[in-house]
Amino acid sequence: MSTANNTPIAKVEYTKEKKVGEGTYAVVYLGTKQSTGRQIAVKEIKTSEFKDGLDMSAIREVKYLQEMQHDNVIELIDIFMAYDNLNLVLEFLPTDLEVIIKDKSILFTPADIKSWMLMTLRGVHHCHRNFILHRDLKPNNLLVSPDGIIKVADFGLARAIPAPHENLTSNVVTRWYRAPELLFGARHYTSAIDIWSVGVIFAELMLRIPYLPGQNDVDQMEVTFRALGTPTDKDWPEVSSFNSYNKLQIYPPPSTFELRKRFIAASENALKFMSGMLTMNPVKRWSAIECLESEYFQEMPPPTNPSEIPLPK
Amino acid sequence: MSMMTAANTTILSATGVSGGVVSAPTTGGGTTTTSSTSTNAIDYDYEDSNKDMCPICKTDRYLSPDVKFLVNPECYHKICESCVDRIFSLGPAQCPYKRCDKILRKNKFKTQIFDDVGVEKEVDIRKRVFGVFNKDLNDFDGDLKKFNEYLEHVEEIVYKLDHGIDVEETERQLKDYEELNKQLILSNIERNKKEFENFEEREKFQKEMRLKKRMLERQIEEEDKSNKEWAKREIINRLAAASTSGSLSSASSASTSIVDNTQDVIESVKSTVKLKKSSARRKLDELNRFLQDNPYFSSSNPNSTQNTLLYQQQHGGSVIPFTPFNGDRDIEPRRFTIEEELYDDPFLKDLQNKKEFIASGFRTDYVYERVLTEAFMGLGCVISEEL
Amino acid sequence: MSDTSPLVVTSKENTPAASQKSKIDAAGTEVVATDGTTESEDSNKPLNYNRITDDELYRHSSQYRFWSFSKEHLREKRDMTNKLAVETIEKDLFDFKALNDLTPEELNALDTKAVPLTTEEELKLIDFYAKKVQVISQHLNLPTEIIATSISFFRKFFLENSVMQFDPKNLVHTTVFLACKAENYFISVDSFAKKAKSTRESILKYEFKLLESLKFTLLIHHPYKPLHGFFLDIQNILHGKVDLNYMGQIYDRTKKKITQALLTDAVYLYTPPQITLAVLLIEDEPLITKYLELKFADNDNDDNGNEVKRKKKNSIDLTVLLSVIKECKDVIENLQTVSTEDARKIAAKNYFCQNPKALIQNLKRKQQQAGSSTEPEQKKQRTE
């Protein structure tokens, strides 16, 4: 990656043509890389807004994106400074899985879902292989390129897998995609939290509505355990030692029959694959490697070629 | 279509309606079934031959259209629902038919499915027998001869029970077989269930594919239409442009060249339209090619190795393996193995026993994996030579 | 993680239908194995197939791509940074001389004292302040890895910039502060300023410049995790032959020495595991040599031709490795501490070459109150 040290050159090289989004800490523009004509997105980070200097989200995003070059992780093309603002030049990705799920005019098949899962898991596996936790996986952060490739994006909450004794904050991941150990406030969680999110996304792709839509943090536990059973010490050692455990209503885990009924379109292997990712006990939950080696990916139908998956008009 | 034959076999054998002999291996969907027809060899001693009247209370379907007839598999004598209620509510009682001494229980009565009680009876017998004799070709390691012998044997049992020949002896055979093969029977029940599910899944898959095909076809139609319109407009526009420029540049040789020109313009626009072969059409071609090779469409057994190969071929022209990681993994053997029991790591072992770590899902194997990976990652890079 | 067996899922298959499906499983296994274990060059690869070994993964890191150099390249880089700064300074000095009416005595003072620093002098000053970065972050009770990151940031900044452009002492706190944030150890700038006895303005002033000089790369692979890995692997390879208590001591001592090694150029010339092994070699050469021999020596003694070829792809040539880590060991052992006195002299020179006016004024003052020592001018320079 070439970094443009020189502001004027950078300004000429990348144009910002259209504002497409504005968040608390950044504005996103569509633009063009002049030398190649390639469409790009520029994420301009509003540095002046922060009294503690460079914002943590920006630091994280820059830190981790610089290290990863993978088909299924968003590409950071360049970074430059202009008018005291930090600008991340990212590859242009016109849509995301949330938009696709919500667009009822789009018809997608189990083979399309399989293709998305394969690409998502490859991206997540690459993060984990680099010892990076994403900590905010959701359909909205799985962007889709014009040729249908899934790109894991938004590393504003990411962090390196910590040293064993370090405490982590459990206040990560958007609520609906939050793993049970996070709901309990665990401080020594692992990459298993990302896999849980992928499992919930898989369920959502099949149902086309959010699978575990808790209305608040307390409700999230209720919704999660009602759908998937309240964990007990038997299948998750020491789960009862979490403070919030005592107040819980105990629900039985769903039978295979119930799951089958809920996910009519899923094959046996697809259900097994989903249950592997949505295993309560994080130790027993499947790793990205186990997921990718799942029979689900090897049985019929094969994952659709990404360029043939329908995209929003 | 071969698929349908296969589908029928699956359904029928799953419910046990049809017996028969498999005559050929599965290639080309060559499963054929010979339905056995039942014969009414037994005198049912009808009090009244009227099909629509209860022989006990004489309620007639023409007068009370709601009347429902029930039979009991003990004797298959037809009795209306209210009579069943009346006669058997207090407990088991003898069949009200004359000369029938069977003792019947209310909970065994069921709605008659087939008009012909003879068929009804045979179906029930088949259900029962096939529930026990539930092997398939796989259980004979594909030995067709042995499998056919087995099927003959089963048919014989069904026939005997159905026709009341050696009933006691046959029942004993059935029971003995059940005792001896309990485990196999149970697992075969599971398998049949699964096969049925597979069948449903295939059905669904086909439906989806058909839907997709229809969508693509519709899309192509629309595109063809708009292409035609575009071509028409384009020809007119170009001709108009050509004639104005032509008339300006060379007024003398105009007439002949305009004719040639017109042909050229039409040809060029036509070829552009051809080039515009829509992505929908390309997709449809691909879909058709895919369906041709698809085991769900072409072969009756989705669980064969052949299908895995076909699957692999879908990824390209020749056999390209499916690679879940697409190379994003270290080569085996790796430079280290994790030997947890050999490590003395007092610090980690201490954490491993802390409640909050256990509950969080903390994994020492992940820690070992990480530090060992980092110990050997880049060990083989010689910077002075590489950079 | 069960990396040795890519067949985890297959073996999990436990349904009643498993026996029936054994064939498809066998085929599936083969398919997975192509990806996970074997590497047959002639077989077809899917689109975008790209084999990334762990070494390859390291080559993808920003540390390798931006911050790894050969000795010659590193030298050139420093000379270039120095040369650019010197050119500016000399031009300014030339202008100063031209614009001011100077006495021969003053010109002489300028020619002897207001001289741009050489690459070596710059390096000494950087080393001196890098050590300061370490001391300050230790004083702030920061975790080892953050201390290491602070040192690394500081040294990289001055690989890109000259001390004649940026006074190193102005970057000490900035690097420590950014290192904390980069390592997810957030302290608000105000409390950091309070603890470090600095001001928020001075801490934040060069933060952008620092990030830019770091080429926006913030993730560093330090040798501490490899050390933990080798600590475990030595127990495995030399099982029963090494005292575990002794291993514990080696670990603690090596960890401290690694931080010292991060003050040397080893970080640019070698990879983290190589640095770790070099430091371990300093600690106990016979033990580490024995370990490496047992670990890597008999790689080629395989009967099966294929096996050897495959192993070689990921294997280590022991002779090459030993020569690399011995070189690395020399670089680490070569670390020379810069005395405060030396640093002070270089800093003074650095100050005067950028501020010839101050030198002249000093000279004038000295002439006025003859006989005074150089102390005041030093003080003045340090409080500036």
Image (tube, rainbow, N blue to C red):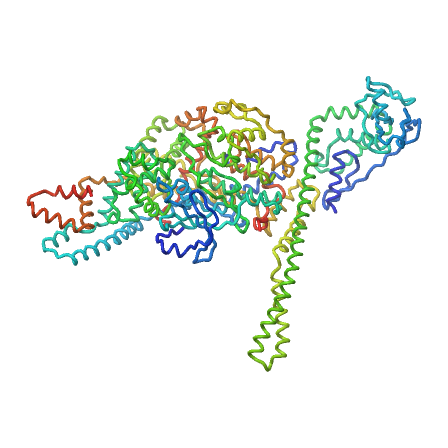
Residue at 52% from the left image edge and 29% from the top image edge: A218
Q: Quick check: can you spot residue C43?
A: no
Residue B196 screen position, x and y as percent = 70, 36
- Horizontal arrangement in the rendering, residue A168 relative to residue B258 (left or right): left
Rendered view: B165 above or below A34: above
Q: Height in image: C38 above or below B85?
A: below
Which residue occupies the foreground of this view, B202 or B268? Answer: B268
In the image: residue A275, left or right of residue B176: left
Of residues B122 and B217, the one nearer the viewer is: B217
Q: Residue furthest bottom?
A: B252
Left or right, C93 with respect to A229, comes to left
Residue occupying the far left of the picture: C370
Residue at 44 percent across and 24 percent down: it is B353
Of B303 and B289, the residue lying toward us = B289
Q: How many marks?
A: 0
Residue C237 position, x and y percent, is 41, 32
Task: Give coordinates of residue B327: x percent, y percent.
Answer: 50, 45
Instruction: Please identify the residue farthest to the top as the structure is shown.
Output: B90
- Tell me where residue C10 appears, x and y as whole percent: 58, 36
Q: Does residue A28 show up? A: yes
Taking depth in this image into account, of B6 and C96 the one nearest to the observer is: C96
Displayed quadrant of residue A13:
bottom left
Q: Is residue C380 above or below residue B167?
A: below
